[in-house]
Image (cartoon, rainbow, N blue to C red):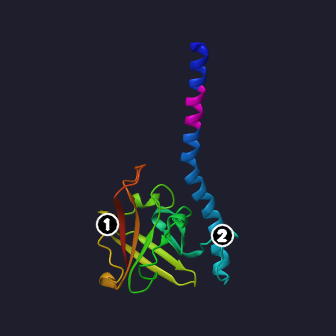
Amino acid sequence: MGSARLYRVLALFVFAAGVGAIANAAYIPAKAALAQILLERAWERAQAGERNAKPWPWADISPLAEIEVPRLDARVIVLEDASGSAMAFGPGHMPNSAAIGARGTAIIAAHRDTTFRFLREVRNGDDVLLVTRGGRRIHYRVASTKVVRADASGLDPSDGGPTRGQLALVTCYPFDGVFHSPLRYVVLAQKV
């Protein structure tokens, strides 16, 4: 094999690897965007009274709530679980935390590069509006943002804070990171 041919084969290999890396990087955001469309449809059915409205027939998740930050024009559907497979499609409610709107701290987690990328723009005083599957509307106001270690968040599901009801929105930090991080960005909002 001549050196010119070897360079062409090597260049083709590098090009194919680059295309593969770009496709892989685009896959997760595309999957999350499509999932939000399907979750939106399931959310409409849940609001109409359908029990266990699944976004696709084989799904093991269903929408639990809708979260909105009006100032940022950000709105996402929250899933009833925060497992890794559920969070590939949207934010999930941590099952070991308080129920949304109940006494204590309800914790919702999502990926920093998809459905919770807007958290980097959240400021103290921002309104956070939630609508539950049952139609209950709950108004929260952002009280603080902080960066914590994942294993030392300081979030206590039984602590409702001064208003007896808190909402913690949690994602990985830093926002521009591409690898797993031991840090989490926490937006803490108090029930109004």
Secondary-structure class at tag 2:
loop
Q: Examine the image and state in which quarter residue 8 appears.
A: top right
Q: Nearer the viewer, residue 125 or 3?
A: 3
Marks 2 and 1, Cα distance to the nearest angstrom? 32 Å
At x 60%, y 23%, the residue is 9
Task: Please name the amino acid that badge 1 sits on.
Answer: Asp
Residue 177's disc number: none
The quadrant in which the C terminus is found is: bottom left
Residue 61: percent from the left, percent from the top? Answer: 59, 72
| Towards the viewer: 26 or 192 | 26
Please provide percent x and percent y for residue 149: 30, 62
Please identify the quarter of the rendering in which residue 59 is found: bottom right
The residue pinned by badge 1 equals 151
Say what secondary structure mark 1 lies in. loop
Residue 21 or residue 72, whichever sits in front? 21
What amino acid does circle 2 point to? Pro
Magenta stretch, overall SS: helix
Identify the magenta region: 12-19
Residue 183 in the figure: left or right of residue 96: left
Which corner quadrant holds the N terminus? top right
**Can you give x and y, in whole percent of width and height, for residue 25 in the image?**
54, 46
Q: Residue at x 64, y 63 (%)?
A: 37
- Give whichever of discs 2 and 1 has the lower sequence position: 2
Please give the name of the residue rendered at 45% of the width and 83% of the height, measured from the top-left corner: 101
Which residue is denoted by mark 2 in the rendering? 55
User: Relative to 36, is 18 above or below?
Assistant: above
